[in-house]
Image (cartoon, rainbow, N blue to C red):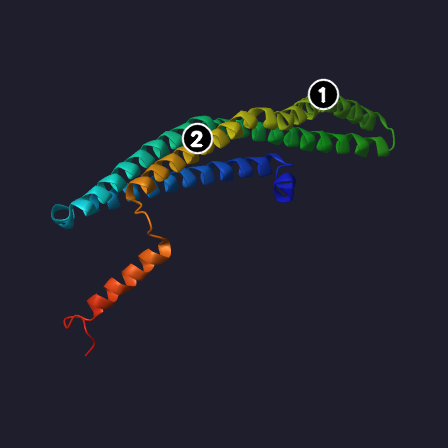
Amino acid sequence: MENCSSECQTPEGLEEQTKRLQKDMKKSTDADLAMSKSAVKISLDLLSNPLCEQDQDFLRMVTALDTAMKRMDAFNQEKVNQIQKTVIEPLKKFGSIFPSLNMAVKRREQALQDYGRLQAKVEKYEEKEKTGPVLAKLHQAREELRPVREDFEAKNKQLLDEMPRFYNSRLDYFQPSFESLIRAQVIYYSEMHKIFGDLTQQLDQPGHSDEHRERENETKLSELRALSIVADD
């Protein structure tokens, strides 16, 4: 939070933070979709396994898994769509403000340079001996300085007035997005708890603990290793 606080003190830092957050959110949703799509593909691959035709219990288990994975993928897609609409898109719109903001800052800096250059010119003539030509040039320099100073002061005042309002508006702008993000995650994981709870009830065998299943697997693996076709030479 300290790094974010310090980086966001300038328009460039805030713009970078906004771009980074938008990019990270997109990577996160892409990864979520890839995960659920891969899970669906695995269950479909299992359904196409010849063992499903030979063993009805295995078919029943894989069918239950496939149904659960498809439900998970549907809820995941719904969650990603919600995040895209309520988080990523607002981040993108917020980021579109920065080109105009950066241009206003550059114009103020250019006005400051012009003001400084003409102010130095006025001061140079003020330090010289007050002869007729010098006084004429001093008057001309002051006349040139006046509109430039007014232009700088106007641009500077605009930034001083509006920049704090811009920074202070961030929380009001982003809070609904992050609240929506939290709600989307809560709804998704609540549904996942139901889906996998139902799946566990369908697949679970009474009296079979994880330790019991592990021992069964080790026993079957030992039987396979004892076959002559897989025995070590």
Left or right position of 2 against 51 = right
- Residue 197 image position (x, y, % from top left): 37, 39
Sequence-first tag of 2 and 1? 1
The answer to which of 138 and 54 lies nearer the viewer is: 54
Of all residues, the one furthest to the bottom in this rendering is 233
SS type, badge 2 = helix
Q: Is residue 199 above or below residue 106?
A: below
Taking the spot 33% from the left edge, 42% from the top edge, the residue there is 200
The answer to which of 163 and 122 lies nearer the viewer is: 163
- Residue 128 image position (x, y, % from top left): 85, 34
Q: Mark 1 sits on what residue?
A: 150
Q: Quadrant of residue 70?
A: top left
- The amino acid pointed to by label 2 is Ile
Pick the quarter of the image with the N terminus: top right
Of all residues, the one furthest to the front in this rendering is 207
- The amino acid pointed to by label 1 is Glu
Residue 176 is at least partly visible in this image: yes
Q: Quadrant of residue 80?
A: top left
SS type, badge 1 = helix
Left or right position of 59 against 93 = left
Left or right position of 197 against 17 = left
Taking the spot 29% from the left edge, 64% from the top edge, the residue there is 218
Estimate the spatial distance between the alpha carbons at disc 2 and disc 1, rounded to whole Å.
56 Å
Mark 2 vs 1: CB contact within 8 A: no
Would you call the spot at circle 1 few (<14 residues within 10 Å), some (14-19), or many (20 or more)? few
Instruction: State the mark number for residue 187.
Output: 2
